[in-house]
Amino acid sequence: MIILLPAREVDARELAPVLREEDRAEVLALLGPVHPVEGPCASLLQSLASAREAWTARDAGGRIICMAGVSRMSLIGMTGVPWLLGSDLVTAYRRAFLVESRRMVARWLTLFEVLRNVVDARYATALHWMRWLGFEIGPPFALAHGLFRRVSKEAA
């Protein structure tokens, strides 16, 4: 069972040191050579500050599973930038995670005409999940300190 709560700064500080290795690698590829905990924490705090809506998922025991949200890409456009970073508990709660993530994406597509972001090209699990959610996956391209793929999904 997953419990969704409005995301808070304290959640970002709790999640950063327990991120999945793949999530940490993705953040560091975007940010470059930064502290492996402080960089992801700063990224989470920035995403949270810019979010139109953001959630923290916890298990029944209160352990943090992930944080997810959507931010507006620009003040003019109707493009949302979905983001999610998780702990290893994502795997333990895989079925509930998949159900909730599909529900979140459907909701976000009522707020924005299109959802668009980038995913580390090495992160096969995240790319598989994005395909499962119905996102289109673009070819690899160089960005910051790694190779990434654009992901996008338009509202019906």
Image (tube, grey):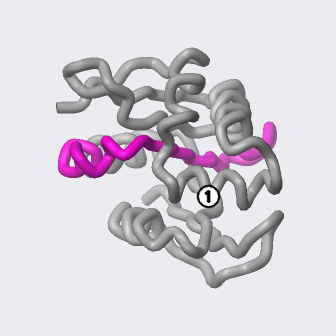
Q: Secondary structure at mark 1?
A: helix
- Write down the residue under mark 1: 25
Position in image of residue 89 (x %, y %): 31, 41
Q: Which residues are magenta?
A: 72-97
Q: Is residue 110 visible?
A: no
Q: Is residue 37 magenta?
A: no
Position in image of residue 68 (x %, y %): 49, 37
Position in image of residue 6 (x %, y %): 45, 18
Does 21 sit left or right of 120 as displayed? left
Tell me the residue at 60%/18% (across/down): 9
Pick the front one: 34 or 144: 34
Pick the front one: 88 or 72: 88
Quadrant assignment for the N terminus: top left
Position in image of residue 56 (x %, y %): 43, 27
Q: Is residue 74 magenta?
A: yes
Quadrant assignment for the C terminus: bottom left
Tell me the residue at 50%/73% (across/down): 136
Pick the front one: 6 or 88: 88
Tell me the residue at 62%/46% (across/down): 80
Instruction: Identify the amino acid type marked 1.
Output: Ala
